[in-house]
């Protein structure tokens, strides 16, 4: 959670640097964006996505897992997080799906969330 908050803070900081340092340049940049057609903006957006957004690293995936388990009021040990992180697909959608499946399995079996339960959900066995 802490790493996720730090990442958001850095993004907000970086978004504010240009308007703070040079409001005139910021306005000019926005005005020039208004002149670009839809196709050009889509190309710029795709380039930004490909260049700037790679697969989340272990620390970010771990932080997301902790947050998702916490949102469901599940107490999960760091051993479970460390087990899941290197074994799961590196997407936020997969993290959400995995936490949901683990939560359902824990409820249906009346068990706590443990590494053996997480392994069972991951492998489907």
Image (tube, rainbow, N blue to C red):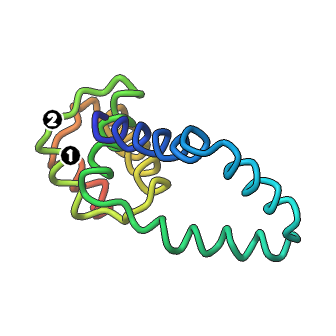
Q: Quadrant of the C terminus?
A: bottom left
Circle 2: is it few (<14), some (14-19), or many (20+) Cα within 10 Å? few
- Depth check, front residue: 61 or 95: 61
- Who's the residue at 41% across and 46% down the image? 101
Is the residue under label 1 in contact with that under label 2 (CB below 8 Å)? yes
Q: Mark 1 = which residue?
A: 81
Distance, label 2 to label 1, CA atoms, is 7 Å
Q: Give the percent coordinates (x, y) of residue 23.
A: 66, 42
In the shown orientation, is residue 72 left or right of residue 42?
left
In the picture, the disc for residue 38 is none
- Who's the residue at 67% across and 67% down the image? 45
- Who's the residue at 35% across and 31% down the image? 107
In the shown orientation, is residue 69 left or right of residue 44?
left
86 over 82 or under it: above or below: below
Q: Give the percent coordinates (x, y) of residue 52.
A: 48, 66
Q: Mark 2 = which residue?
A: 77
16 over 82 or under it: above or below: above
């Amino acid at each position: 959670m802490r790493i996720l908050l730090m990442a958001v803070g850095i993004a907000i900081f970086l978004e504010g640097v240009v308007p703070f340092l040079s409001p005139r340049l910021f306005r000019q940049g926005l005005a020039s964006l208004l002149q670009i057609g839809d196709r050009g903006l889509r190309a710029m957006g795709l380039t930004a996505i490909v260049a700037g957004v790679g697969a989340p690293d272990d620390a970010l995936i771990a932080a997301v897992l902790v947050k998702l388990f916490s949102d469901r009021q599940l107490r999960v040990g760091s051993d479970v997080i460390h087990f899941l992180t290197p074994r799961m697909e590196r997407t936020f959608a997969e993290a959400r799906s995995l936490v949901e499946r683990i939560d359902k399995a824990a409820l249906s079996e009346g068990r706590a969330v443990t590494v053996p339960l997480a392994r069972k959900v991951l492998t489907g066995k």
